[in-house]
Amino acid sequence: MFNNTSNLLLQTMLYLAQTDNITFPVNYTADANNVILEGDNVEVKCYGEYGCFSVAGPWQDVSSRPVNLFPERPDKIAPRYCLYTRNNRNACQYLNHKDRNSVIMSNVIPTLPTYFITHGFLEGGDRPWLKEIARQILRRYDANVIIIDWEQGSGSPYTQAVANIRMVGRITAHLINVIRTELGLNVANVHLIGHSLGSHLCGYVGSVLQTNFGVTVGRITGLDPAEPHFSQTDPMVRLDPSDAMYVDIIHTDSRPFIKGGELGLGMSAPIGHLDFYPNGGENQPGCNQGMMKYINRENGSFYQGMRRFLACDHVRAHEYFNESVNTVCNFVAIECDSYDEFLNGDCFSCLSDTNPEGKICAEMGMRSLGHWKKYAPTIASSIDPNASPHIRLYSLTNGDSPFCTYLYKVTLNLANSQLSKDHGGEVGHFLVQLEGTDSKSKLLNVFKEQHYKPGSIHRRVFGSTYVGTIKSVLLVWNHSTTMNILTWRFEAPVIYVESLTIETFNGGQKLKLCPPKLIALEAGLSFRMIPC
């Protein structure tokens, strides 16, 4: 109940932040500091070196963005660019494209990879997660890391923040061009990383670099790109594959913006070259816990803790990306037509020369680029050359850090013996514990509660810790009683299992296991499945 209440609270907050309940005459803009008087062109507004901005055409849509504003003045938004390198990990240097000495005298090393990281609505550049990603990148790579702080333009109303990222995108593109012309930066080595509204901001940076300066950024990573005012819009309005040589997206809160009392803040549509949907792209594990957990994580701040609680699914995207930078675990994701098919094990091996029927596989997060380079020629040859590739990949995560998990597939065969038929089916669910050469997993609720009939086969993909080579599996069955009188039992509820097959991802190990003998598994008890 509290989850629904919290979603309604967030809906109300976001609605008020979006619209401000203001309407404007056709001959005025919403920018109180730059009012366009009657007789002026109300569809275009210019800001000196940053050019002109239109609110007509694709920028105005009755269904997707009924309120469309001009960006605020550059000096009002005043984005700041904070540079970290291995020579100044803890104290940033501020860069300003209008002060070229700030670039020339900085610690920027133009031959190194350069990362720009930015936040979304109602946030600023001082957020701990931004600095943590910067820290993780510098731990792994010798690089330039620049945090884009546009806090002065990210406040409410939401519609104004949506407009302001267009300006921040242009200012950022100008800064990158100054670094390029003054220091010789190769823009192909630039990686833009944005969360929520920041994702689309990065798209604008990429677009302006191409249009104004004739260069293409190497990579853009969109971390749960914002859905309100961007869903079903023209590619010019949102992040899309044309904005960089490679665009990867992590979707974590992709429910429709308002559906059944719940709120989704991220986009569901694929908008990159590779689109990752961990846990189906919504309802992330661990996001159904109490608000006090998040208040504690925010050092006791009720406001920040409440925001984190309400937007838990949304912020998981940058948490997953942060972990992906240095984890030894691979955030493996697999191409599949749907999340249900992925969970059912229909997509569990990777495309290769020896496995032409396999699916595209890639690591979610920082290391996805190498996988894209591997598969890009195959993808390009198999699609319409005029179409943009959108590859959907699915994966699983844990409910808390470390989030990365290893994928396993289990196939459960229920006995079709006479004993099993005579007893009939049962309602309940199965739990498994993997036992390997290195360790044991937790007891995992792999198969959902349902009716299990004799002779039926059940498959499921699940995530667990790495246990080494699997030797055996502990199987537990729990009986469930419902109000349906047909499920009631007057003798002990039991179920007959014939075999269980466990597979590690992409053909690493496949092991068929059987019970010690064909005996009934009683509810609440377990037996150890061993190699047949």
Image: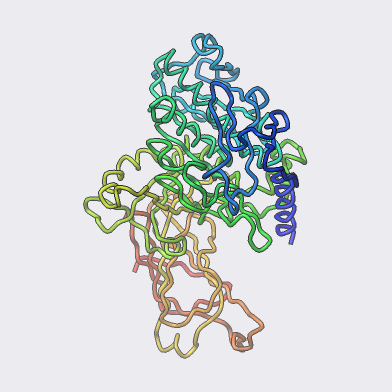
Relative image position of residue 350 (x, y in whole percent): 32, 53
Q: Please state which of residues 384 and 179 is positioned toward the viewer in this rendering.
A: 384
Q: Quadrant of residue 308?
A: top right
Coloring applied to the structure? rainbow
Which residue: 45% across, 85% down?
A: 420
220 lies above or below 334 = above
- Which residue lies at the image location 44% right of the left edge and 76% below the top edge? 497
Q: Position of residue 32 (x, y in %)?
A: 73, 32
In-front residue for pair 22/445: 22
Q: Nearer the viewer, residue 51 or 396?
A: 51
Is residue 251 shown to the viewer in this render? yes
Image position, residue 305 (x, y; %): 72, 42
Q: Is residue 16 left or right of residue 393?
A: right
Q: Is residue 155 above or below residue 106?
A: below
Residue 517 image-quadrant placement: bottom left
Q: Is residue 439 visible?
A: no
Q: Is residue 446 left or right of residue 310?
A: left
Q: Closer to the camera, 45 or 324?
A: 45
Is the C terminus in the top left, top right, bottom left or bottom right quadrant?
bottom left
- State the residue lying farthest toward the left: 354
Instruction: State how many labels appear.
Output: 0
Above or below, comparing residue 277 to residue 113 in the picture = below
